[in-house]
Image (cartoon, helix red, strand yellow):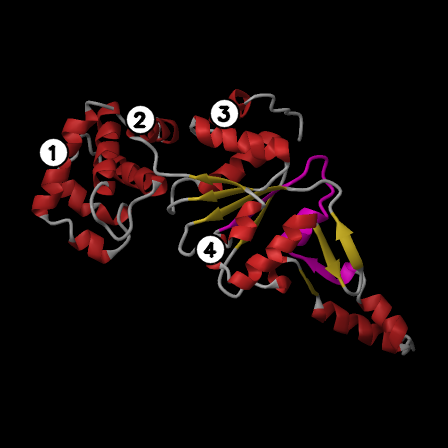
Amino acid sequence: MGNIDFKTVDDIQYHLDKQQYIANRELSTSLFLSLKMNKPIFLEGEPGVGKTEIAKALAKIIDTELIRLQCYEGLDVHNSIYEWNYSRQILQIRMMEVEGKSDQESISSEIFGSKFLIKRPLYQAIDFEGSSPPVLLIDELDRADEEFEAFLLEILSDYQISIPEIGTIQAESPPIVVITSNRTREIHDALKRRCLYHWIGYPTAKQEFEIIKRRIPKISETLGKQVVAFVQAIRAKEFYKYPGIAETLDWANALIQLGTTDLSKEITKDTLGTLLKYQDDIESMDDKTTHGLIQKAFTEASLI
């Protein structure tokens, strides 16, 4: 595990903090146990709450490679484990024919060697040769089909893959696996049982203000607290898509670029596109609603 041996939950919380990732005690404990028990961690939560950033922070802390498998509908073996480089194989066949080599067994043995194999993320993680195991991020698993879940379950059971033309490849040291889901659908219980589970919610006002201060040091305390209080107020109302931490940071940056020192109804309405990403949500922010949320933000900001 690199040069770092996490002896306590405080250790991992300290190193996450150094990577500018603010984790509460419960999340730090889940990560600590995941590492100590060599079990994947399954992180579920709304988009934009920092699930993917956990894997990035871990890779930096451990000083190892981050291997990311971005899930999507239709993801299959060829896109997640390996595929053959067909153009190179065809070129090799033609070269062998020119050299007078026509024996089918020899040709097959040559073109199905490892140098013609394109390694995809799961293969890369299993066959990793670094000094520390890699962090394997399986991102947004809920976007993949259920069939892929079953296949992934098999991989996580033994940390090995089988390629008919080559054989079985076993991981010398299992990767550190982080699985994320935005919960657009339920993930099968069998896969969850292989993992330690943790739900990541939106940060508290104090946590979000701390994030803003670290990521945008030039923001004033007054504006930073108003931004956080306004975003927190939005999350307390009915919207189709709530702003995540990334949107909070984008909005804060936009306000700074416009020379804003205090929130106003006008500047808020002009910049809603950095905070809300659906037109129905933006249209619901009429003058009365916007004014009410700003007044609430002014009141709540003093409590942060």
Give how far apart the Cα atoms at labels 3 and 1 are. Answer: 35 Å
Q: CA distance from mark 1 to mark 4?
A: 38 Å
Q: Label 1, label 2: how many angstroms apart (C-alpha)?
A: 19 Å
Q: Which residue is mark 1?
A: 295
Q: Secondary structure at mark 1?
A: helix
| Residue 153 visible, this angle | yes
Magenta segment includes 137: yes
Judge whether residue 86 is colored magenta: no
Picture coordinates of residue 82, whole percent (x, y) = 67, 60
**Residue type, label 4:** Asp
Q: Which residue is mark 2?
A: 206
Mark positioned earlier in the residue sequence (3 or 1): 3
Q: Which residue is mark 3?
A: 13
**Which residues are the magenta region?**
114-139
Going from the N terminus, do you reach mark 2 or mark 3 first?
3
Q: CA distance from mark 2 to mark 3?
A: 17 Å
Is there CB contact under 8 Å for labels 1 and 4? no
User: Which residue is identified by label 4?
Assistant: 142
Of tags 3 and 1, the one toward the viewer is: 3
N-term mark: 1 or 4: 4
Q: Residue at x 68, y 53 (%)?
A: 123
Quadrant of residue 246 within the rendered picture: top left
The answer to which of marks 4 and 3 sits earlier in the sequence is 3
- Viewer-nearest of discs 4 and 2: 4
Residue 63 visible in image: no
